[in-house]
Image (cartoon, helix red, strand yellow):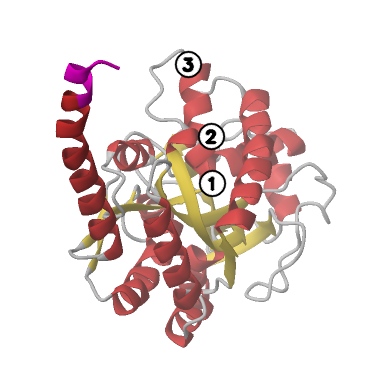
Amino acid sequence: MNRRELLKAAAVLPLVQAACSQSSFAQALYPSRNITMIVPFPAGGQADLAARPVAMALERVLGKPVIVDNRAGGGGGSVGNAAAARAEPDGYTLLMTLSSLAVLPEADRLFDRPVAYEVSQFMPIARVLADPTLLAVPASAPWKTAQEFVEDARKRPGQITYGSSGPYGTLHVAMEMFTNSAGIKLMHVPFRGAGPALTALLSGTVQAIAAAPGTLKPQVDDGKLRVLGNCGAQRIASFPDVPTFQELGYKDVEMYIWAGLFAQSSLPAPIATRLREAMAQVMASPEVLKAFETSGSLVAYQDAPAFSAFVATDSARLIAAVKKIGRVE
């Protein structure tokens, strides 16, 4: 290196050191302003039910407002997921999303569409919930059991309608798993989220829905809905009398609606650590435990390492299911 290059390097070094110092200082002060938690679905669905008590508790732990931003659109949550992926990786834009996170890019590829985002753009922070999907119908419907539902569907292929949170969203994939295993054909009616799909079921616009326990329990308790089947491997405490589809002979039906908190993959390690520590406190807080218990969901907390492994395993299973389903309009 000649003298001129040495002088140039000496001039630049203080600027680099100052930038690094400012970055470290900003990370040390995190958070210094409001945090936005994007929920890529309308109010009333599983992601929203998970986000609100978590945001309130996270605000108490971090000492700054955590604002829930319902950013629905694109079917299955792709618009909100993509917005979070593009956000600055500074810890001020987080994402509370569902298991459809991994499915939607594969659906884009299946239809030769531009991929809105990649799962690799996200860093798992903490899993919050992991509930099995439940098949629900109006309490006034003629089907008292899943067997009766299947028998009727076989007699009237394509005539029974079901709602979902959007094509290849969690609710759609769960129902397609069931219909493929049962050998029946239903009519799919996509909505912009689980909340609108549930509203359509209650109003009679559709005749069935696959949704999370927390979404369905208030309506079941009010006598408005009936649950026929459970996509999980085991029965759950909030619906102990509802059999699993595996019990009923549909061995390849297993689907969970998990909700988890994510940040951008390039989030600085000190901020990621701060968020992980905060979420450990949040998920142990009595207020959050009570909120989830009341809604019919139990806390299924996992810290980042375990959650990352879970996402990888579950995503592989869901992607295989989507490829088996194929192109569905």
| Number of residue marks | 3
Apparent side of residue 276 relative to residue 151 in the rendered image (left or right)? left
Q: Amino acid at mark 3?
A: Phe
Identified at 31% across, 45% down, the residue is: 89
In terms of image quadrants, where is residue 117?
A: top left
Q: Mark on residue 99?
A: 1
Q: Closest to the observer: 264 or 236?
A: 264
The CA span between labels 3 and 2 is 13 Å
Q: Closest to the observer: 30 or 287?
A: 30
Query: Which residue of the protein is positioned furthest toward the top in this rendering?
Result: 112
Instruction: Verify CB contact (< 8 Å) between mark 3 and mark 2.
Output: no
Tell me the residue that label 3 is attached to.
Answer: 111
Work out whether mark 1 precedes mark 3 in sequence or the reverse, and give the earlier one.
1
Identified at 62% across, 31% down, the residue is: 319
Residue 38 drawn at (x, y percent)? 31, 52
The segment highlighted magenta reads: 1-6
Nearer mark to the viewer, of 1 and 3: 1
